[in-house]
Image (tube, helix red, strand yellow):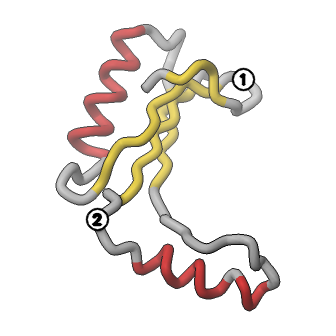
Amino acid sequence: MPRIVVDVMPKPEILDPQGKAIVGALPRLGFTAFSGVRQGKRFELTVEGPVTDEILEQARNAASTMLSNPVIEDVVNVAVLDEAGTQDAEAN
């Protein structure tokens, strides 16, 4: 069954305490190449049948009204996953 993935991230001006904790822990675990981390959310919406433009529009509407808090978060991606779980052409 096809899936649509929705990625949501905190707005740049919003503090991200989880990201800050992660970036502090990375060097202690030997990962020294990273200077910043922002943690977001990922949703996978399963679709019965093919993903049409109408279904993608519904996913975008759900992302902006229910899956994210538009005051503090941005929807950064809405894309169809293919059978292998990789993103098809960007549907944002």
Which element is circle 2 on?
loop
Q: Is residue 71 left or right of residue 10?
A: left
**Label 1 secondary element:** loop
The crowd level at tag 2 (other Cα within 10 Å; few <14, some 14-19, many 20+) is few
Residues 3 and 30: in front is: 30
* Amino acid found under the numbered disc labelled 1: Glu
Report the Cα–Cα distance between label 1 and label 2.
Answer: 36 Å
Q: How many marks?
A: 2
Relative placement, left or right, of 56 versus 14 is right
Do the numbered discs 1 and 2 sit on residues whose CB atoms are within 8 Å?
no
* Residue 66 image point, x, y percent: 25, 44
Residue at the (38%, 16%) spot, across then down: 55
Query: What residue does disc 1 label?
Result: 83
Mark positioned earlier in the residue sequence (1 or 2): 2
Point out residue 58 in the picture as x, y percentages from the top left corner. Answer: 31, 23
Relative side of 36 to 58, left or right: right
Residue in the image at 56% along x and 71% along y:
36
- Find residue 71 and report its image quarter: bottom left
Q: Residues within 10 Å of mark 1 (few under 14, many from 20)?
A: few
Reading the image, the residue beneath label 2 is 13
Instruction: Judge depth for marks 1 and 2 and give the one in front.
Output: 2
Q: Quadrant of the N terminus?
A: top right
Q: Residue furthest bottom?
A: 28
